[in-house]
């Protein structure tokens, strides 16, 4: 499949590759150059492959509360919450953002690879839970999206698009008009920088892309989107979260409101796991060498026993260290614990560190 911006990526000379069923740009000028543009100025990403649903009707809030790990009941209108869809056994169906328009209107935004799976899961849950008055709609084919990220993003929104976002707080959204078209704009992102995610029909997004490009905004591929999110410890579904990795194991229990009056699917399992302590957990690692750890590489204790595996690893661009996130057995999750990483036939010393490797963050 192709997004509405596909031809523009090709015209710009982007390196294209299959991702989540779409032909997506991986890199334009280079991953370090695009990564640094977002850290220092502003960059834009085509994220039109993401999935958008609508949950509406008088039963919408009750349904979202039941399937979503975070708190939607106390989420003010116009705010966004991060959380997960979990199964009864605590495994993660997907992680997502939920936009609350009102108690009867929510927009969940899900990962591109999981659109069909997530929608089918929600349909099944709706049938099983027997919550009435819920309208569930898949908007994905009619919504495209650009992520504008970086410390200059607010200025770019104002100067290039004529949209004053100075009053928009982190994890809130608005629905302004632009050139006669309604947008949904949130102050969210996946990079650790200030920024906005802009949702609109395809023809509007293609126009916005051109305007931003003319304004000198760096087009960025999915390669640096991954290095950026990784450096600030954000999880990627299929790596730090999965069907067999719970939010507690993923060190994301803060996004699971275990005290909801009616709970959510799997909340009893996660509460027990949190109380007893998980048998394994996602941690950060720093290799004491320039070797680069990659997903799937084994993590060993100092005696050479396998205790886990790398979930994501890079030579950090902003921190200039060989770093990784890894799922390791509980006895080895304490900060400063010495471990080893097997890279092909050699082992390299590593130490457990906080998984937020890059400390800069945006707070408004």
Image (cartoon, helix red, strand yellow):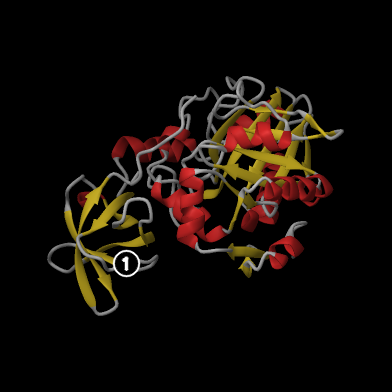
Question: As displayed, is residue 50 above or below residue 274?
Answer: below
Looking at the picture, how far across and down is residue 245, in whole percent? 43, 52
Residue 4 place in picture, x, y as percent: 77, 56
In the image, what residue occupies the spot 62% across and 58% down? Answer: 113
Secondary element type, mark 1: loop
* Nearer the observer, 349 or 110: 349
Residue 117 sits above or below residue 1 on the image: above
Tell me the crowding category of disc 1: few under 14, some 14 to 19, or many 20 or more residues within 10 angstroms, Cα based.
some
Query: Residue 93 vs residue 309: left or right?
Result: right
Q: Position of residue 233 (x, y in %)?
A: 40, 46
- Write the residue at 22% across / 76% down: 346
> Can residue 238 be spotted in the picture?
no
Q: Is residue 99 left or right of residue 331?
A: right
Q: Hey, which residue is sitting farthest bottom in the picture?
A: 345
Dividing the picture into quarters, in which one does residue 68 lie? top right
Residue 178 is situated, as x and y percent measured from the top left of the image, at 80, 33
Q: Is residue 342 left or right of residue 199?
A: left
173 lies above or below 85: above
Q: In front here: 305 or 340? A: 340
Residue at 37% x, 43% y: name it. 251
Q: How many marks?
A: 1
**Any part of residue 37 in sight:** yes
Q: Which residue is mark 1?
A: 292
């Amino acid at each position: 499949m192709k997004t509405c911006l596909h031809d523009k990526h090709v015209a710009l000379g982007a390196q294209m590759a299959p991702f989540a069923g779409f032909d997506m740009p991986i890199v334009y000028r280079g991953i370090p150059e695009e990564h640094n543009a977002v850290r220092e100025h502003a960059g834009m990403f085509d994220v039109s492959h993401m999935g958008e649903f609508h949950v509406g009707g008088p039963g919408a809030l009750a349904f979202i509360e039941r399937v979503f790990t975070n708190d939607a009941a106390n989420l003010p209108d116009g705010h966004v919450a991060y959380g997960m869809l979990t199964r009864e056994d605590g495994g993660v169906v997907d992680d997502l953002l939920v936009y609350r328009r009102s108690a009867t209107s929510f927009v969940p935004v899900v990962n591109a690879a999981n659109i069909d799976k997530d929608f089918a899961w929600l349909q099944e849950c709706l049938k099983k839970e027997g919550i009435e008055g819920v309208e569930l709609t898949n908007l994905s084919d009619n919504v495209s999206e650009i992520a504008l990220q970086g410390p200059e993003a607010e200025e770019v929104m104002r100067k290039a698009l004529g949209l004053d976002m100075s009053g928009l707080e982190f994890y809130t959204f608005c629905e302004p008009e632009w050139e006669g078209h309604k947008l949904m704009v949130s102050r969210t992102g996946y990079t650790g920088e200030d920024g906005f995610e802009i949702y609109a029909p395809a023809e509007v997004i293609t126009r916005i892309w051109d305007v931003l490009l003319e304004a000198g905004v760096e087009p960025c591929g999915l390669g640096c989107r991954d290095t950026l999110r990784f450096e600030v410890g954000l999880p990627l579904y299929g790596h730090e979260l999965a069907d067999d990795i719970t939010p507690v194991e993923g060190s994301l229990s803060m996004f699971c409101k275990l005290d909801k009056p009616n709970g959510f699917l799997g909340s009893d399992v996660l509460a027990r796991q949190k109380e007893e302590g998980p048998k394994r957990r996602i941690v950060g690692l720093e290799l004491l060498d320039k070797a680069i750890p990659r997903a799937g590489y084994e993590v060993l204790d100092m005696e050479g026993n396998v205790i886990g595996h790398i979930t994501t690893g890079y030579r950090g661009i902003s921190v200039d260290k060989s770093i990784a996130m890894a799922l390791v057995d509980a006895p080895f999750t304490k900060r400063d614990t010495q471990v080893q990483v097997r890279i092909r036939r050699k082992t390299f010393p590593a130490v457990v560190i906080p998984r937020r490797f890059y400390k800069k963050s945006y707070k408004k």
